[in-house]
Amino acid sequence: MTIAELQLALPEIFVLSMACVVLIADLFISDERRGLTHLLALLTLVFAAILTLRVMLPAGEVAYAFSDTFIRDRFGDVLKVFSYVILAGVFVYAKHSLRQADLFKGEFYTLSLFALLGVMVLISASNMITVYLGLELLALSTYALVALDRDSKFGSEAAMKYFVLGSLASGMLLYGMSLIYGATGSLELAAISQSVAGGLGDSMILTFGLVFIVIGIAFKIGAVPFHMWVPDVYHGAPVAITTLISSLPKLAYLALAIRLLDNGLIGLHEDWKNMLAILVALSLVIGNVIAIAQTNIKRMLAYSTISHMGFMLMGVIAGTAAGYSAAMFYTISYAIMSAGAFAVVILVSTAEREADQLEDYKGLAKRNPWHALLMLMIMFSLAGVPVFLGFFAKWQVIAAALSAGFVWLAILGVITSVIGAFYYLRIVKLMYFDEPDEAKAIEAPVDFRAMLAVNGVAVLGLGLFSGGLISLCVSAFV
């Protein structure tokens, strides 16, 4: 271990150190001054971003550390920076929600920072052991976050389902990794890629290992038919936790797919692209169709997530730099949109109850015209309406599918996008054309309203000027 290697992992070391500092400092902070914990967590993200940007490698350059178990490249750096940005937004949104639910505790920030550390380790993994360590650190933190409200039966049930099915997914992924290790004799992704490309190793064992790895990835991202945990966890968890789960881990799961399938198993592309195509098709159809029948907005957005993860995998299928950059652009875009959508759920909720029913959004335009407009822009973006961010994200992944020869999948993506537009526009209809049950204006802290305004305007601004973000994603795979 050298100083140069430690410098490459400086953002991870800093986040780990600050997570421990937040954990200890919170013991001495009273409930009345819990905002100090919130501020300390936000400062952690700011300085982590500065450390990442200071040593960001130029496009095309790669550096390894710790016996080639840790990789630093443009792809990882860009994802990490957006992880900080998204988690900062989640912290601002969550503070208001947790205070309403009497859950404003230091455990939320400590577990969130450890989840972020898991995301960062997973993003920079170049060895199967590092992949698994990052994945489990993220998973264990989110299991505990879902169960944060110990008095909620729905939350406890959701946490148990999440834990059991998440552990099953981790076991399958680990078994697949062990098979790949048995076939190639290495845990390093670069060495595995060379072995597979050179025709070394038993092809039958490699294929079996690939199947388990794809199943593990599908479980983690919630792709059909391994999606059964998503709606229950989204529904049962406190809305502040749902906001986090629906956004931050998606960046890690994109890295999980690209690191394993591209960096390690690109030689089996012909095999895994067909497996992913089936997952994509099922996720697009089932996710969008079942979302139509939901009356609970958290479950509706959960099935929406399933369909969006199908779009993300559509970009990965191509197995090319263009496809990966499209998938990266889509994942970042979706994380921004999803955080904004759940922020509006937090906004409409009260201390007495969560606004998780569609009827709760009736007449929102009359109660809060500005926030209704922000929700409209977010819903339009999720639906893929032109000029908004979501439209260009879908355009990119559909173009990647066409370039890979999956014309039928691209057509299916267009059709299911039209189907999905129905349940997004239903929210808009309720906000603008139905009468509210109460006329009282909705109150929220200044920082919450400012962050929501930035989030809502971003889905329009990043859509109108999407070239910069697309170029940034493309530069990650030069």
Image (tube, rainbow, N blue to C red):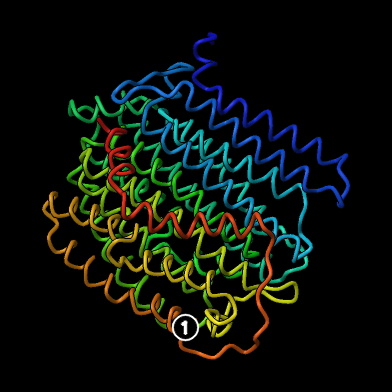
Q: Quadrant of the C terminus?
A: top left
Residue at position x 27%, y 64% in the image: 386
Q: Depth check: give the residue in front, 200 or 241.
A: 241
The x, y position of residue 344, in whole percent, is 56, 67
Rendered view: 244 above or below 439:
above
Q: Residues within 10 Å of mark 1 (few under 14, many from 20)?
A: some
Q: Depth check: give the residue in front, 11 or 178.
A: 11
Farthest residue to the top: give it. Answer: 2
Residue type at the position of mark 1? Tyr
Say how many tags the image has: 1
Give residue 435's quadrant in the image: bottom right
Q: Is residue 437 left or right of residue 125?
A: right
Residue under label 1: 432
Q: Quadrant of the N terminus?
A: top right
Residue at position x 23%, y 30% in the image: 196
Q: Is residue 415 left or right of residue 71?
A: left
Residue at position x 48%, y 31% in the image: 130
Give residue 445's quadrant in the image: bottom right
Q: Is residue 377 left or right of residue 52?
A: left
The x, y position of residue 35, in whole percent, is 77, 48
The x, y position of residue 430, in whole percent, is 48, 84
Residue at position x 44%, y 59% in the image: 337
The x, y position of residue 453, in whole percent, is 53, 59
Q: Secondary structure at mark 1?
A: helix
Rendered view: 85 above or below 236:
above
Give residue 245's quadrant in the image: bottom right
